[in-house]
Amino acid sequence: VTEPDLRGRHVVVSAGGTREPLDPVRFLGNRSSGKQGYALARTAAARGARVTLVAANTTGLPDPAGVDVVPVGTAVQLREAVLKAAADADAVVMAAAVADFRSATYAAGKIKKKDGQDPDPIVLVRNPDILAEISADRARPGQVIVGFAAETDDVLANGRRKLERKGCDLLVVNEVGERKTFGSEENEAVVLGADGTEIPVPYGPKEALAETVWDLVSERLR
Ligand code: C5P
């Protein structure tokens, strides 16, 4: 039996991966499936929370029952939706993979290859860092903010630096690997706390990692 320890709480979860369009048919994207974010939304709802799930390009995943799903495409759209939902939220968990950059230009018509000519370079501009922004400028005192980081090397040292840079309360650090993280049903992570704590979560279903995240959020909300 799940404890309804999040009853009366509003939590916001972002999931999936943003797509930054180049023209009507192409985009810059990433390999996030949205499964970890959906597991977070389902488990929070089961623990009694009102849940807003900001879902970036997660077609194919069924809407979790009783969860308010806000579909978005780009980082800029994700930012708008997260800021709006975070205004009265007790906790925000940024599980979405947000593109750091987008194309500086959008071609209204499909980009064509021209015979004998090199392709035009794609010029990138920075996207807003939503996690850093909501952490620096909390919508409510005591709001708990959680980030995710997928790292390939020096996982813990990079995670610790990222936690400090972003200013969030908790950072879930994943090692990117064959059987875990992107698209997989399983994950393995270490949850770093701004208070110096380090909670390892062994290889297992994304639900189990989600429950650990809510345990730590719930502790901080008490
Ligand atoms: O810097 P990096 O992309 O590794 O950080 C990952 C964390 O920051 C995730 O929680 C992601 O949702 C968030 N993020 C964000 N806005 C960005 C880039 C990442 O909120 N532009």
Image (cartoon, rainbow, N blue to C red):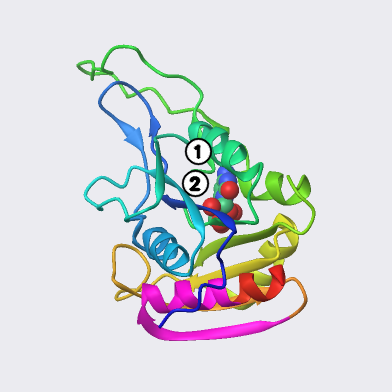
Contact, mark 1 vs mark 2 (Cβ under 8 Å)? yes
Q: Which residue type does callout 1 highlight?
A: Leu
Q: Which residue has dot 1 on it?
A: 78
- Judge the density around disc 1: few (<14), some (14-19), many (≥20) Cα neighbours within 10 Å: many
Residue at position x 62%, y 45% in the image: 86
- Judge the density around disc 2: few (<14), some (14-19), many (≥20) Cα neighbours within 10 Å: many
**Lower position in the chain sequence, tag 1 or tag 2:** 1
Left or right placement of residue 97 versus residue 183 in this view: right
Tell me the magenta residue range.
Answer: 197-215
Q: Is residue 116 visible?
A: yes
Left or right placement of residue 50 versus residue 63 in this view: right
Give the quadrant of residue 116: top left
Left or right placement of residue 220 versus residue 217 in this view: right
Q: Is residue 127 visible?
A: no
The CA distance from mark 1 to mark 2 is: 8 Å
| Residue 206 covered by magenta stretch | yes
User: Does the beta carbon of the residue at mark 1 sit less than 8 Å from ligand 1?
Assistant: yes
Q: Position of residue 138 (x, y in %)?
A: 75, 48
Closer to the camera, 66 or 201?
66
Give the quadrant of residue 147: bottom right
User: Does the beta carbon of the residue at mark 2 sit less than 8 Å from ligand 1?
Assistant: yes
Q: Position of residue 190 (x, y in %)?
A: 55, 79
Q: Which residue has dot 2 on it?
A: 98
Residue at position x 73%, y 45% in the image: 139
In the image, residue 99 sits, relative to residue 114, either above or below, namely below
